[in-house]
Each structure stands twice: as C-alpha cells, then as structure tokens.
Amino acid sequence: MESHDTPSKKPASGEAERTAINWTSRLRVETALNHREPDRIPYDLGGSILTGIHEKAYRRLRRYLGLPELEVQIEDPIQQLALVHEDIKRQLGVDVYGVNPGSARGPNLSIWNEGGYDKLRDEWGIEWWKPREGGFYFDMRAHPLAHIDRVEDLAHFKFPDPLDPARFVGMAERADELMNRRQLAYILGRNAPGIFEIALWMRGFENFYCDLLTNQSLAEALLDIVCEIKMKYWAEALARVGKNVMMVSEADDLAAQNRLLVAPEIYRKLIKPRHQRLFGFIKNQAATKVRIFYHSCGAVASILPDLIESGVDILNPVQVSAKGMDTRELKRQFGSAITFYGGGVDTQRVLPHGTPAQVRDEVRRRIEDLAPGGGFIFNIVHNIQADVPPENIMAMWETVQEYGAYS
C-alpha cells in the first residue's frame, strides 16, 4: 500500500497474479478474510446494522448524488438506520450486503405516541423512547426484569421464540442470490444483540452490574437463557443457508472510551466462557467455514487475545479514538489473527466535524495502517450518524478508491 507520506504509488508484490483474476466482490472479501491482498480493499455500506447509515444522512447523500427521491425504509428502528438502496450500492461499489432475519409474528415491536415521544417495546419487553421533535434515535427507558432478584423469577418471563418461522422467510433464497448468482459477500444477521447486552438491558444497567458481583447465580442464569436462545436461532439460520455463508454477526459492547465496562476477571469468569460456547456452536453448526464478525465499541485492545481465543475472526468497528486502539499497533500485534472490519475513519470528530481534506488524510492514514497483507474491510467506526455531511462521506469514499488498490 502507498505510504501516507509518499504521493507516488508503487506496485505491490503479487500484482501480476492479481491482475489476471476476475475479482468478484465475493472473492475480494474472501481473500481479505484469508489475510491475503485482493485487487482492492473491500468496501461496505449497509452490510449490517453496525455498518450502516442514519436515515437523515442517507437522504442527504442521495440528494447530493443526484439520485431519485425513493421511499426510505428503516432497517433498524432503534438506530433509525436506512435500508441502503441498490442504486447507491452499485454506484459506490459496495462489496458486502446483509441478510437479516425477519420480524417475529408474535409480539414484536409495539409502537405508540405519548407525551411528545415515539415509544416502542421490543420483543424482549425493553421499552424505548424517541423525542418526536428533534429526536434521532430511540433510547432505553424501561427494563422488564428490573424488579426480580431470584433465579426462579426468570421462569415467569416469556422470552422471544428464536424459531418463529417469520424470522427465516426468504433467508435461504437471499443467501443463494447474493453468493452464487451475484457473487457478492454478505453478513448473516443475528436475532438479538449480544448475550451481555441483552442481560444488561433486561435487568437495567445498575441492577446487572450489581448482579455480576453480588448475585452471580441470577446473572449466570440470565446469560445462559440468552445464550440458549441465540444457539437455537443460529442452528436454524445456518441450516437454512447451508454452504452459502461466509460471515455471521455477533456483538457485545464490552468497553467504553477509556476502559472495559467490566473488570477483566469478571469478563473472563462470566462472559468469555459463554462467548466460547456460542461461537464454537456456530462454527460447529455451519456447513462450511464461517467467520464470527464480532462487534464491540470502545477500548477492547486489552482483551483482544481473549476474543481471538473465544473464536472471534473479525473485529468491528475498531474504535480508533478509544484508548489503546492505535491502528498501526493493533495491526502489528493482531493482524495475522483477526480481520479488522472498520476503523477507516474516526466518527467522533473527523467524519462529522472535519473538512473533506481532513477526512481524506484520516482515511489515508487508516488504510496505510490496516490494509497491508489483507485482513481489512473498509468501513467507518460504527454507523454513519445523522450529522455527517454528504461531502465528507464522498471524500471518504473517493479516498478509498484512490488509495485502496493493492497495485
């Protein structure tokens, strides 16, 4: 790859071999996941609900590109993410698509308006509110297991059915269309956020953090229920898609800006073993080699060896602004063991508030750090937020086109 300080491009090793290959998106992503250099860095926009774009930013981007005013579907109501249309994916050369489960037929999202808020209750019973005026997202406001304190109380709660047939409608056909007929890569979406996240959200943050120290039997019982629900979903989803799968999405935000959200010993005692169980189950159930695409924001560098040992193959979003998340050092230490999916540009300051020139400089730096040797798929740090101007989105994309080739 081109050095950040050198304006001229130099041929990379293996250039002749690469130019002789018909590079489909599927092959490009597969090559990167195998820690080899394809023709160019694979690019994602909207391949998952962790690599998408807020509907407000998306509408502005469509106008900026002179594209028709189409109806914008909301793919993820909590984050208000737009379902990216095919015309933008084709124009921007997106390599990774998404195959997400459908909504369950039973109680799923109940939505109502009250007191100046749009409100919804999801299938786990968690309540979310968004201000009707000026609101960008839904925030958690009620936790269905906040008032229990015994393991026995969990038996009285109706948890979601992971095998509801509506989740799997069209999943196999979509996977076949993308991977075989269109030769595109995709991420197979999960039925719920992470094991740790769901437990936090159902009990409430203060309650569950206390459980981890003073009521571990309840904490472990809830974590195990969520893990079992996830395993049932993955067994069915993987059976549906068969060999037409490459990456599956899992997540648990384990860190904040400067440190882990739990002490390392608590993580290793209570969370890591369940990750190992879940990720091992997924890989054993899959009909072909499958990679665990794992999302955690924040300063996770200290537990990257644990995540790798647990079975994580792909780290997203690579929060470059968090403590210890220096991209050059991460690549040096872990680049042969894990694929970095994201980290292409800082989204706390540079992408929303920087100039296009600053965006270009940031993208070039991250490409220089993360791209050599493969093992890198370009995306930003988490989703493109509502306040990001289209000029900066396109400055990012243009820089990837200019400096993202491996020849």
Image (spheres, grey):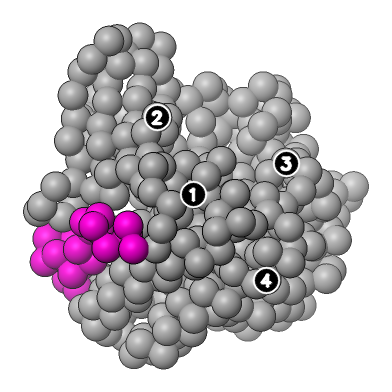
Tell me the quarter of the picture where residue 206 sits: top right
Residue 230's spot in the image, x, y percent? 35, 69
Instruction: Determine whether, in the image, residue 110 is placed left or right of residue 26.
Output: left
Residue depth check, mark 2 versus mark 3: number of the one nearer the observer: 2
Locate the N terminus by quadrant: bottom right
Mark 2 crowdedness (10 Å alpha carbons): few <14, some 14-19, many ≥20: some
Instruction: Determine whether, in the image, residue 367 is placed left or right of residue 212.
Output: right
Locate the C terminus by quadrant: bottom right
- Disc 3 marks which amino acid? Gln
Residue 205's spot in the image, x, y percent? 53, 42
Q: Earlier in the sequence, mark 1 or mark 3?
A: 1
Residue segment shown in magenta? 152-173
Q: Earlier in the sequence, mark 3 or mark 4?
A: 3
In the displayed structure, would residue 329 be above or below residue 124? below
Q: Earlier in the sequence, mark 4 or mark 2?
A: 2
Q: Residue at 42% x, 84% y: name it.
A: 281
